[in-house]
Image (spheres, rainbow, N blue to C red):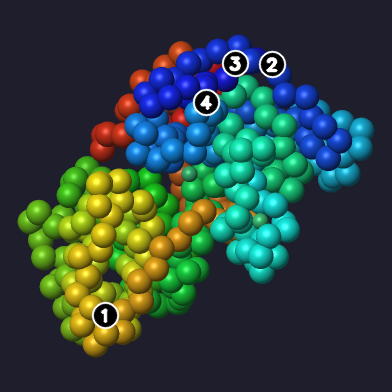
Amino acid sequence: MKAAVLEDVRMLNVQEIPMPVPKPGEVLIKVAFCGICTLEQRLYRGDMKIYYPIVPGHEVSGEVVEIPEGTATQLKPGDKVAVDMVYRCHECYFCRSGQSNLCENRFNKQVKPLGGFSEYIAVKPSQVYVTGDALSLEEAAFCEPVACCIRSLKKLNVTLAEDVLIIGAGPMGLMHLQAARTMGARVFVSDIDDSRLAAALELGADGVYNPRNTDAAAELKQLTGGRGVDACVLTSPAQSALENAFQAVRKNGRVNIYTAYTGPSPTLPLDMNTLHRNEILVTGTEGRTEADFQQAVRLLTFGRIKVKPLISRIVGFEDLEEGILAAMGTETQRVLLGTQI
Ligand SMILES: [Zn+2]
Ligand SMILES: [Zn+2]
């Protein structure tokens, strides 16, 4: 079967590798689509390293094709599914306390993390979520990123009738926007790219701001009785985004640094006295739990989060490298690998 192996920084080789043989306790999935997320872009550029060689890819949809004897599961061959490609050991402290997104063994070399840039994968049934016919397989590849947005908004305790600012109108920003609206918030989006702001308005943003020509914090304060927004999510790694978040958030507001900062020194330019006096809570979020994943599947199935408009391009293995490079630019939202193309 075909797989794209990242041999080293910027060395992606599409090659024939042996088909995985599912062991008892596993199922075989024929991959249909796999999103090219920022994680894959970082691995490709070498900003983030797990190990080499590695088959990237963690936003997988596909079909169950084989269930070997000795696998107890409700899955059936032919089921259309989304796959949660992170390994959760279910034994460590974090797994056992409901925080499996922080599993200590998730990047353990023995368990082969990621792997979605392949034609077939063998995974545990607990990683597989049936998406049914309500979702296309293209849409089902968005279950993972939507799940991460749900984790982010839950961590911020976003609730009914709150004001939320999303900084960055890339794919993660636009999924956060829709998830936060579903949770009952009024949602504002800021970005320096006007075409991305137009996409945010199309997907329901209650207001959009380009910090190059608008003082978003001042306008948001005016809309909120002088207070500022209740919560803010940074989906842009720019340091100016963090400064904007602190100007826009109210006293006792919450800020989630959702995305990794890829510059040389990811240190916060924080005024300790501002944090102290204004009781601002700052957090990050990492991945998603099984509960988040299940909720993402359901929200997508209900049609509450629209992801079709986020698909900019679908590439085959032959164009995958080009697709990764395109995904890094602001003129695309999500680029998907279609493994059967
Ligand atoms: Zn664990
Ligand atoms: Zn992702």
Residue kind at label 1, given as amino acid type: Leu
Q: Earlier in the sequence, mark 3 or mark 4?
A: 3
Label 4 close to label 1 by CB (< 8 Å): no
Name the side, left or right, on which 119 lies relative to 29. Answer: left
Residue at left 46%, top 44%?
Answer: 307
- How far from the left and from the top, in percent, is residue 132? 69, 42
Residue kind at label 3, given as amino acid type: Lys
The answer to which image quadrant residue 196 occupies is top left
Neighbor class of circle 4 (other Cα within 10 Å; few <14, some 14-19, many 20+) is few
- Figure quadrant, ligand 1: bottom right
Q: Earlier in the sequence, mark 3 or mark 2?
A: 3
Name the side, left or right, on which 31 lies relative to 68. Answer: left
- How far from the left and from the top, in percent, is residue 164? 33, 69
Neighbor class of circle 3 (other Cα within 10 Å; few <14, some 14-19, many 20+) is some
**On the image, numbered disc 1 is attached to which residue?**
275
Q: CA distance from mark 4 to mark 1?
A: 43 Å
* Residue 136 sits above or below residue 212 on the image: above
Label 3 vs label 2, nearer the camera = 2
**On the image, numbered disc 4 is attached to which residue?**
53
Q: Earlier in the sequence, mark 2 or mark 4?
A: 2
* Residue 5 sits above or below residue 251 on the image: above
**Element class at badge 2:** loop
- 317 or 4: which is nearer to us? 4
Q: CA distance from mark 2 to mark 4?
A: 15 Å
**On the image, numbered disc 3 is attached to which residue?**
2
**On the image, numbered disc 2 is attached to which residue?**
18
* Residue 340 sits above or below residue 168 on the image: above
Q: CA distance from mark 3 to mark 2?
A: 9 Å
Q: Earlier in the sequence, mark 4 or mark 1?
A: 4
Residue kind at label 2, given as amino acid type: Pro
